[in-house]
Amino acid sequence: MADQIQEEAATLPTPADESFRDQLMMMTRAFGSSPLRNTIMGLCATIFAVIVATAVGQVVLNRWYRPFYDALERRDLQGFFYQLEIFAVIAAVLLILNVGQTWLNQMIHLKLREGLVRDLIGEWMRPRRAFRLANAGAIGVNPDQRMHEDARHLSDLTTDLGVGLLQATILLVSFVGVLWSLSTGFVFHVGGSAFAIPGYMVWAAIIYAGIASWLSWLAGRPLIKLNGDRYGREAELRFSLMRVNEHIDAISLAGGEADERRRLELDLATVLQSVRLIVRAVTGLTWVTASYGWITVIAPIVIASPVYFAGDLSFGGLMMAVGAFNQVHASLRWFVDNIGGIADWRATLLRVASFRAAILKTDELHEVEQRIEFTEAKGDRMTLEKIEVASPGGCVRLEEADIEIKPGERVLVTGEPGAGKTLFFRAVAGLWPWGSGRIGLPAGEAVTFVPRTPYFPPGTLREVLSYPQGSQTFAEADLAASLTKAGLGRLVPALDRSERWDRELNDDDQRLLAFARLGLHRPRWVVIDEALDTLAGDARRRVMSILEDLAKAAIVNIGRAERNGHFFTRILHLAKHPDGHVLKPLRLNPAGAEKATAAAEMEVALRKRRA
């Protein structure tokens, strides 16, 4: 069964190409640099001490078996009650140690997850990394799943398996000596001759657990690949459900429920297929582990029975030997009992480690491709020199070769539909560096980039207007004035109300709110991506009034040509060259580029590039 499952699993994609050793070393280095390292190490040292104390208590409890069972065999009532008093003391101490170990275990869960997720979020949220990762192909899809569910699962498995392995190792060391000493008195009588096997019960436990571990590995090995595939497909289903929920209005208006249902059922079918393979593998593994579980009930008694029936071992001694055997065997069969968890841990580590590796390497993505040079412009100006932007569909070129923009200028960058205006906007923002030419941004100045679709963080309206600065940055009078200027005066009483403002407001109000925020911040350099093209009538007049108030600011609008306005005094032209003209079209993953759109708009939303 295992071979058949492996053949089926071989056709499923794997999320990483790096070796297990590389992944483990990278995650170890990340842990070494974590600010929570000392806290976690302190908790681990404490739980180590607790486990050692528990092992000592278990040895004491094992020694208690002999006098207790011997008292039963002798029908010694006074001795029986005395041994119960001793047991109560041992059990009370072990109970305290067990409760303490449980608390420490949960705290390690908590701190390990905190450290891992903080590390992933910190690396992911470095400037422009999230956008570029989204263009890196499948590895950049569903980062929320990797940082939330996979990181939680990896932390839980690492803690449980690590503590379990540590406890099994300490118990093994503690009871091997006990079992070896008990085996010293074991004498076998065969054909009138007697002989002893040094450490007989120890060797029996090792051989017994070794066979079980080997068979469990053969049966459980396919689970590593199968679990990794399942997590990937679960993430795809979750992404599809989120996508449908976010666009349910448009889907309902178009009557597309049946088509979306078909897509969701296809994603569900891939998840169920992965689960079916896991069910088959787990069933095969259970045949092995459950069989050994039942055999273990009588195995130590059967192994020690020749000595007991020969009269060389008392009943109490037999029970003591059985208890020590079970402790040694339980420690040795830790691998058998946890093969499923180990496979799950390995698959989860692969997903998290490959995602973290992709984050770290995303800055080197397509390093072999020609890149636009970003510099600091000399003086108070912005420069664009021979700009050509490469993309999978061709190249976008700014027809004017050498451009210099100064404060107070109003510049319109326009082109035919499909010319690549948004791609040019991303290139100026530094999100899309592939191409040629040089972009010089004003030294020591912040450039505010306004995307076509505004982004509002969750929180109060005050926080939305102040974003990306703190909510206490602006006076309430200034916040109210900016809303009134944009025609949103009715929202002034709601400044401290927390809402999903991207859903609370209609499209026009969202755009007006974005420009109200722009007028509040009053930047000296503004680059706009087609945000003005969607405005008309009173809304457009209000926005143009806000822009006119920014008299000292350089405003670059990328969009359609003006019809009746004279706000923009310079016009630049974009043209698309499908044949590459100067550069070869960039070979990026088109699917990854499409899925990056939402992340890109969010990333550039009013974010400031600082020197």
Image (cartoon, rainbow, N blue to C red):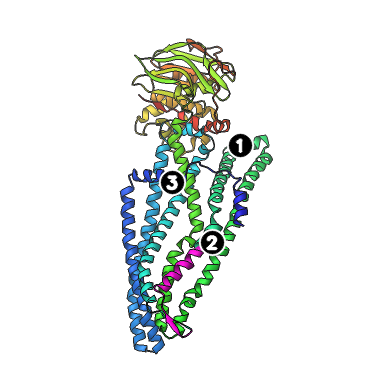
Q: Of callouts 3 and 1, which one flags the residue occurring earlier in the amino acid sequence?
A: 3
Q: Name the residue under label 3.
A: 21
Residue 607 position in % (x across, y down)? 42, 28
Task: For residue 536, say whether it is visible.
Answer: no
Amino acid residing under circle 3: Arg
Marks 1 and 3: in contact by CB < 8 Å?
no
Residue at (41, 84) in percent of width and height: 312
Q: Spatial distance from mark 2 to mark 1, Cα to Cα?
A: 54 Å
Amino acid residing under circle 1: Asp
Query: In the structure shown, which secondary structural element does the residue marked by tag 2 occupy?
Result: helix
Q: On screen, 323 above or below 132?
A: below
Task: Name the residue nearer the viewer: 439 or 73.
Answer: 73
Query: In the structure shown, which secondary structural element does the residue marked by tag 1 occupy?
Result: helix
Residue 249 shows which numbered tag?
A: 1
Amino acid residing under circle 2: Leu
Residue 338 position in % (x across, y down)? 48, 59
The magenta segment? 191-212
> For this view, does 521 lie left or right of residue 544?
left
Magenta span contains residue 283: no
Q: Of callouts 2 and 3, which one flags the residue occurring earlier in the amino acid sequence?
A: 3
Q: On screen, 330 above or below 249?
A: below
Q: How busy is the neighbourhood of tag 1: few (under 14 within 10 Å), some, or many (20 plus)? A: few
Residue 65 position in % (x across, y down)? 38, 78
